[in-house]
């Protein structure tokens, strides 16, 4: 069983400066992401491992929870204190929480355009 963190606890952790890794593809990330989240698409997650600390929790997020569960399982197998964010970025945005756009972790913006169907495959 992959450990999950619910949206409320994640929001609290995020407000306290949690480390967030977004494992969606780059198009999805650019369209909207949790402010401060690092982009590390699931197929390339191994390339980001050197930048992830093992001494603090890693909150892994995707669109709805499937890819983040896979990434969390992998990270935990490698010794990371990782947690999959239940409901993903979709639930974060649906709850009215801020989102950032673009290629950088960024800060919140007013508009959050959804990813196109081609980008979510």
Image (cartoon, rainbow, N blue to C red):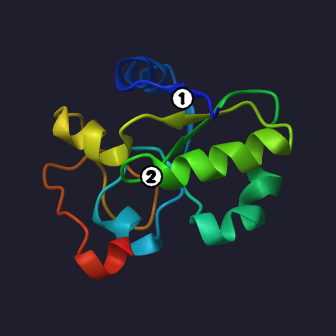
Q: Is residue 22 visible?
A: no
* The C terminus - image quarter: bottom left
Nearer mark to the viewer, of 2 and 1: 1
Q: Secondary structure at mark 2?
A: loop
Instruction: Identify which residue is drawn at 27% across, 47% down.
Output: 90
- Give the image location of residue 92, x and y in percent: 29, 37
Nearest the camera: 5 or 27?
5
**Quarter in which the N terminus is drawn:** top right
Residue 46 percent coordinates (x, y): 76, 64
Please give the label number shown on residue 4. Answer: 1
Give the residue number, with chain letter if any, for mark 2.
Answer: 62
Q: Dot 1: what SS?
A: strand
Q: Is residue 67 left or right of residue 95?
A: right
Q: Is residue 109 above or below residue 29?
A: above
User: Does label 2 or label 1 sit earlier along the sequence?
Assistant: 1
Q: Is residue 98 visible?
A: yes
Do the numbered discs 2 and 1 sit on residues whose CB atoms are within 8 Å? no
When the figure is inspected, residue 44 is found, relative to residue 87, above or below; the finding is below
Q: Residue 16, position in %: x, y?
A: 49, 19
Q: Estimate the spatial distance between the alpha carbons at disc 2 and disc 1, rounded to whole Å.
A: 13 Å
- Please state if 52 lies on the left or on the right of 102 as rendered: right
Q: Is residue 90 left or right of residue 28?
A: left
Residue 40's image quarter? bottom right
């Amino acid at each position: 069983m992959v450990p999950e963190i619910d949206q409320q606890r994640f929001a609290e952790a995020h407000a306290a400066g949690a480390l967030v890794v977004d494992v969606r593809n780059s198009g999805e990330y650019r369209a909207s992401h949790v402010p401060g989240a690092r982009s590390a698409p699931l197929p390339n997650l191994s390339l980001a491992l050197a930048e992830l600390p093992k001494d603090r929790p890693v909150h892994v997020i995707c669109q709805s929870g499937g890819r983040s569960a896979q990434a969390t399982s992998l990270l935990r197998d490698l010794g990371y204190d990782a947690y999959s964010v239940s409901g993903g970025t979709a639930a974060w945005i649906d709850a009215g929480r801020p989102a950032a756009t673009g290629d950088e972790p960024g800060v919140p913006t007013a508009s959050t355009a959804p990813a196109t169907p081609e980008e979510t495959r």
